[in-house]
Amino acid sequence: MRKKFIITIDGPAGAGKSTVSKILAKNLNYIYLDTGALYRALAYKSLKKNISLEDVDALAGLCSTTAVALKNFDGRIKVYVDGEDVEEKIRTEEVSMTASKISTYAVVREKLLDLQRKTGIRGGVVAEGRDMGSVVFPHAEYKFYLDAKIEERIKRRYKELLDKGSSVEYQSVQNDMLRRDKQDKQRKIAPLIIPDGAVIIDSDNLTVQGVVDKIASYISIK
């Protein structure tokens, strides 16, 4: 039987991780694990319950009473919160910023760490996020760090939101991106770093398919 690997793709917001990971997973017939969606799921619940992000005890209570589940639909993992499909509801800027904030808390990361590792226990997973290769799957067979200049990442995020029909200002997207970068890189627990052994890929001058092809060129599946 052909061995199935764990492939991690880390990097900052707007670098193109999600799009590239989805295509790569489909090409390899692997599961695509959007770990950021897990944090968004808890962020969504915290906003729904009006929980203060400064109240650690309340966040701990939220984690202990919230059922976060991953379900596989033809290789795409969808996230459920207390039985509710929240796939579309967790893609707003408000949820994104809240997710970035709550991911700094140990109690939140511990809640989701085991769930992520169980998903990848049999391999055959493309996992994208902020600490996939450094914390969640440190022994992954293939690690990548996808990056792009801040200006390019802001443009991509702005276009993505406009394409979804959001009425958002460029300056607002820029401010949010800068805030998220700061939170992700400066948090005390599992900050965004380049994982040991990761291949760094600059996507500034590459198409999506170009990035996918470059990543695939490093992977040997026999």
Image (cartoon, grey):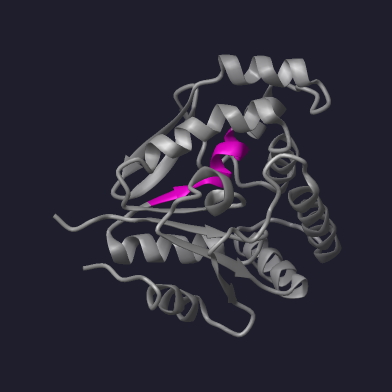
Place of residue 175 in the rendered image (x, y in percent of width and height, measured from the top left)? 85, 58
Quadrant the N terminus occupies = bottom left
Quadrant the C terminus occupies = bottom left
Residue 24 shows in the view: yes
Residue 85 shows in the view: no
Q: Main secondary structure of the magenta part?
A: helix
Place of residue 23 in the rendered image (x, y in percent of width and height, measured from the top left)? 40, 65
Q: Nearer the viewer, residue 156 or 117?
A: 117
Give the residue drawn at x 31%, y 52%.
Answer: 124
Place of residue 211 in the rendered image (x, y in percent of width and height, measured from the top left)? 49, 76
Give the residue drawn at x 70%, y 69%.
Answer: 153
Left or right, residue 208 beside residue 13: left
Above or below: residue 113 compared with residue 157: above
Place of residue 4 in the rendered image (x, y in percent of width and height, measured from the top left)? 27, 55
Kindly indicate the quadrant of the structure image that contains residue 162. Answer: bottom right
Above or below: residue 195 compared with residue 204: above
Q: Nearer the viewer, residue 172 or 59?
A: 59
Instruction: Please state the extent of the stretch shown in magenta in the rendering.
Output: 32-41
Kindly indicate the quadrant of the structure image that contains residue 44. Answer: top right
Give the residue drawn at x 58%, y 34%.
Answer: 41
Above or below: residue 43 compared with residue 24: above
Give the residue drawn at x 63%, y 64%.
Answer: 160
